[in-house]
Image: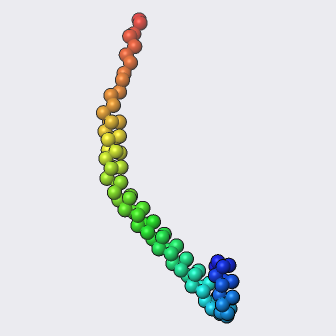
Amino acid sequence: MDDFIKKLLKHRGFSNNILQAVEERTKRTSAEKEMEDRLLAEAMTKEMVNQMMPMFRKHLEKQQKAKEEKNVRKIIVPDDK
């Protein structure tokens, strides 16, 4: 926890129990915030993947078609007999 807040509470005469309670609440709040941020990031990632998947599939299909349509070139060497 911020030293300024600790010093302010101590200066104002609050006991250590209150300081500890404030520290625990601050830790819990940051942990909850971190979990919310992770869940939000996961949801955003899933949404982006779901939006991009059809475009990715089309791209793969185009590549596959191009590979199939590519003509095989044959080199014919005349027989010199």
* Residue nearest the viewer, comparing 19 with 77: 19
Residue pictured at 38% horizontal, 58% vertical = 49
Q: Is residue 37 left or right of residue 11?
A: left
Q: Is residue 42 left or right of residue 20?
A: left
Residue 72 is situated, as x and y percent measured from the top left of the image, at: 35, 27
* Residue under the image location 44 percent in, 66 percent down: 42
Figure coloring: rainbow
Residue 53 appears left or right of 34: left
**Residue 73 percent across, percent down from the top left:** 36, 23
Number of numbered markers: 0
Indicate the quadrant where residue 19 lies: bottom right
Q: Residue 30: x, y in percent?
A: 55, 77
Quarter assignment of residue 51: bottom left
Q: Nearer the viewer, residue 53 or 33?
A: 33
Which is nearer the eye, 2 or 24? 2
Q: Residue at x 58, y 81 (%)?
A: 26
Q: In which quarter of the view is residue 64 placed?
A: top left
Task: Give the residue displayed 69% in from the left and 88% down from the top.
Answer: 11
**Percent of width and height locating residue 5:** 64, 82
Measured along the vertical axis of the image, is residue 66 above or below residue 74?
below
Q: Nearer the viewer, residue 63 or 74?
A: 63
